[in-house]
Image (cartoon, rainbow, N blue to C red):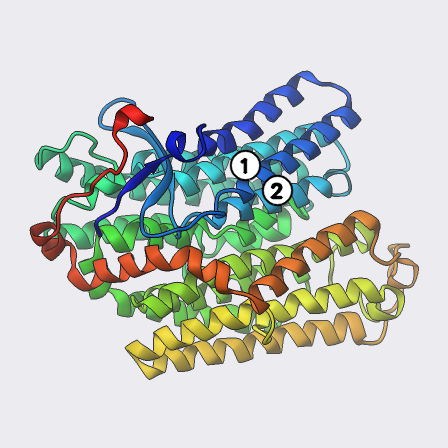
Amino acid sequence: MNLNELYATQQVGFPMLSALIFLPLGILLMLGVIRDQKMGYQLALWGSVAELALAGMVPMREFSADMQLVERFGLFMGMEYHLGVDGISALFVPLTALLTLLAILYAEPAAKTDVRQYLMAMLGLEATMVGAFVSLDLMLFWVFFVLELFPSYLLITKWGTGEKRREAAGFYVTIMAAGSALMLAGILMLGMNASQAGKEHIFDFLTLLTVPLSDKTQSLVFFMLFFGLAIKAPIFPFHTWMPRVLEQGPVVGMSIFLVGLKLGTYGFLRFVIPLVPDASKEWFWLMALLGTVGMVYGAAIAMIQTNLRRLLAFASLSHMGVVMLGIFSLNFAGFQGGLLQMINLGIAGAGLFFIAGFLYTRLGQPDLSVLGGVERHAPVLAMTFLVIGLAGIGLPGTGGFNGEHLVMIGAYKVHWLMALATGIGTVLTATYFFRYFLLGFLGEPSPAPANPHTVATMPDIQKREMVIATALAAMIFWIGLDSGPFLRTMDGSLKALEQRVQQGATVHTATAPAVTVSVARQGQ
């Protein structure tokens, strides 16, 4: 895995990735000074438009396995400020910016009170997520990974909609902190090994690729990193926080980040598999087993849910099982399918949570007890739910079909049972989705509850909601009908990753040259 580095100053003339991190932070600080709610909202909205425009430039280049738009300088104790993107990470940056913009567009109905502070929390969350996706120093990645907890806790406790939101927030932070501590131990183990090998930047991803690891050390590091990332994803059986947070937390806000941005499974592709490829091959069967169990369990529990937000929580767990089957097929097709599914499910999953938010602002909790007959009174809203849901099922023409197809190909190359499990997951997804759609949107109206807001009085989709729905639907069909640009972006990096897995860490470090840098540091 011989990677070059192309510096941002040589490619675009300015530190683009730092700008993407610090632009939302700058707007956040300005919102702390501006007291006018309307002015603050306009600032956050147009700042997010600028962020998306800048983020959209990231994947608009020819990608090989090389790291591009690189920025780096030393910090302390072997840690570097080292940023860069390749085909694995490039698509997550504009996805983060898009979801943030759409969440800010819907901030006033979602937050209702203290909108300015809500926007500040959302922008802080965006900055930490972008920072995590572009970090090439493992310790820097961990710092962003942990910083994400602060705006998340605030969003859950202050704008959560459930009576037990504080308990949910406390549980979320506790379990994430435990996983982060284990992940930190794994990173420190890698750093100590690099230090003993005489390396200077002991947490740098590209440096660590050149440092050999014993089989025992690889397994230890694998599981330490696994626990932190598996909790974040989440992957069965580390998912217990998710239904609580998605039901008790903000109706949109943080939910679209948790469901839409797959930071946990991204970490497996970005760091775990390339750094400990031999351990990944040794334990792939366990990852495939957890993915299969989580896929079936999540779908089975989703089938019996009456609350849409809880249904989507378990649906996300089930979808993570498909992604795990893809990436731990450890071959090119599986990597393609897993990564494409992360992007597609990011759009479709976030889209369904937006629909849940639209329903919440009209009816309260989107439960079958208050639904029924939505299609008669809000046909456009019902159609929007159907279209976005079909992407989650994997209907041909949507991004979900191409992702699941590639996962099945990659899984079949390992064992036909893995491919069969993926197919079963698709059937189960269709079952719980159509059940809810038939009962909640096409079924008979529920008896009028004590709440005066009923389906019969609810308005159809509004202007800002239509903008959100149109943007998400456009992305779903773009990926489904023309996956070529997305696959070309990721192919070079995924081929290099497949080669790394085939060679193994020990063989690679014994036969391949060290990571090279195509531009001298003086060019930064």
> Quadrant of residue 446 in the image?
bottom right
Residue 273, percent from left and from top:
27, 56
Look at the image and tell me whether residue 335 can be seen. Answer: yes
For this view, does 349 lie left or right of residue 140?
right
- Residue topped by disc 2: 100
* Res 53 → quadrant: top right
Tell me the mark number nearer the camera, choosing from 2 and 1.
2
In the drawing, does residue 354 fall left or right of residue 412?
A: right
Mark 1 burial class by Cα count in 10 Å: few <14, some 14-19, many 20+: many
- Residue 469 shown left or right of residue 517 in the figure: right
Q: Which three-letter amino acid code belongs to the residue tagged 2?
A: Thr
Tell me the kind of residue under disc 1.
Leu
Q: Position of residue 351 (x, y in %)?
A: 65, 57
Q: Residue at x 72, y 41 (%)?
A: 105
Q: Say if 466 sits above or below 480 in the image.
A: above
Judging depth in this view, the residue of 251 and 516 nearest the camera is 516
Name the residue: 34% across, 79% down: 412
Determine whether label 2 and label 1 are within 8 Å by CB. yes
Residue at 48% x, 35% y: name it: 128
Q: Nearer the viewer, residue 472 or 305?
A: 472
- Residue 253: where, in percent of width, then height? 64, 43
Which residue position holds label 1? 125
